[in-house]
Image: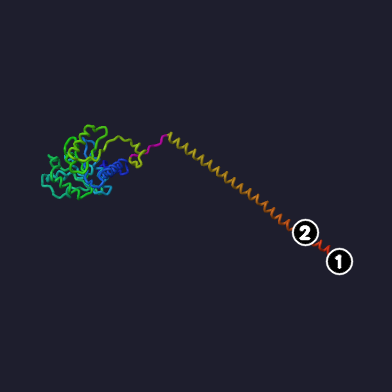
Amino acid sequence: MKKELVTEQDPKSPISEVFRTLRTNIQFMTTKGKLKSILVTSTMPGEGKSWVASNLAVTFAQAGKKAILVDADMRKGRVYSIFGVSPRPGLSNYLSGVDWDDREASNYLADYIQETDVENLYVISAGNVPPNPSELLVSDQMTDLMERLKDLCDIIIFDGTPSQLVTDSLILTRIVDSTVIVIASKATKKEDLRRVIKNIKNVGGKIAGIVVNKVPVDAKKYEKSYYYGSTALAETKPKSRSAKRASKEMYNRASNMIEKKDHTFEKIEKVKDDTKKENSDLEKPKALQRNIKIENADKVSMEKTTEILNQMNQYLDEEKKKLK
């Protein structure tokens, strides 16, 4: 499996997230959920339609959908090389009924569907290059193939030919549910895109949208602005001398702040201890005063009692004298 399958090799990258967004947008194109077949085409060769079709198919498979990617570019198909499967037998062999060694091809569709390393994703290669690809696509065998594939899977993705050069993709737009056009940034001509859109609409095809490919992107900007940030884009650079010096100064400054903070805590604790000691010293005299008061109160009460007793004795003595 090649590195072109970004959605499989690096599923957390920003590019993979873009493909998942594309998948979601395509799914919401129809409210009733009847979208089962998609054609991916372009205006001219080299705009990246096969790359987009392959990664889009992977995202559908990752979402739990049973997907089949059909290489409908029977002239220069390259889906087999992206997934590392056999180039034959393929679509041209099934539609023509001729095997690659001029023998009669198998009638079993299972013989043409190849399993990939991606779970839930299957591939039908382009097969041998036929002399009449357009005629094969308009045959009854192609219509029958479409119906049989719809019964076997949840989504069918066709990697078509460039629509500006040949009519193969224009034929497919009539039998698929929707079409995605891939263009290259700063390379695709506006007039070519307008012509392709017009041709698709003229034959009764539906366009889901346009994918702008090969947009220049700075990896650093992705890392700073994107939530997911691919780990493959991140690079660890050695620190310069100035950076090391700045780090050391920050470390020393932090150490001094911590040391000052510790001294401040020590002073606070000392003040707390002194305050507690003063409070205890203040409480001691009060206790002593309370004891003194209690003791003096006892002493005063005894003296008073003695004085009263002496007065009573003196009174009694005087009364005795009067009686005599």
Give the image location of residue 210, x and y in percent.
25, 38
Residue 19 - label:
none
Say left or right for 188 vs 138: right
Q: Residues within 10 Å of mark 2 (few under 14, many from 20)?
A: few
Amino acid at circle 2: Lys
Label whose residue precedes the other's in the sequence (2 or 1): 2
Question: Front-most of 283 and 264?
Answer: 283
The quarter holding residue 320 reads bottom right
Quick check: 307 above or below 275?
A: below
Where does the N terminus fall, quadrant-wise?
A: top left
Confirm whether residue 6 shows in the render. no
Residue hosting label 2: 304
Point out the stretch of residues depicted in magenta: 233-240
Assign the C terminus to one quadrant of the image: bottom right
Q: Picture coordinates of residue 84 (x, y %)?
A: 22, 44
Does the stretch in magenta take in 287?
A: no
Where does label 1 land, which residue? 320
Residue 109, how many percent across, how many down? Answer: 16, 49
56 and 102: which one is in front? Answer: 56
Residue under the image location 55 percent in, 42 percent down: 264
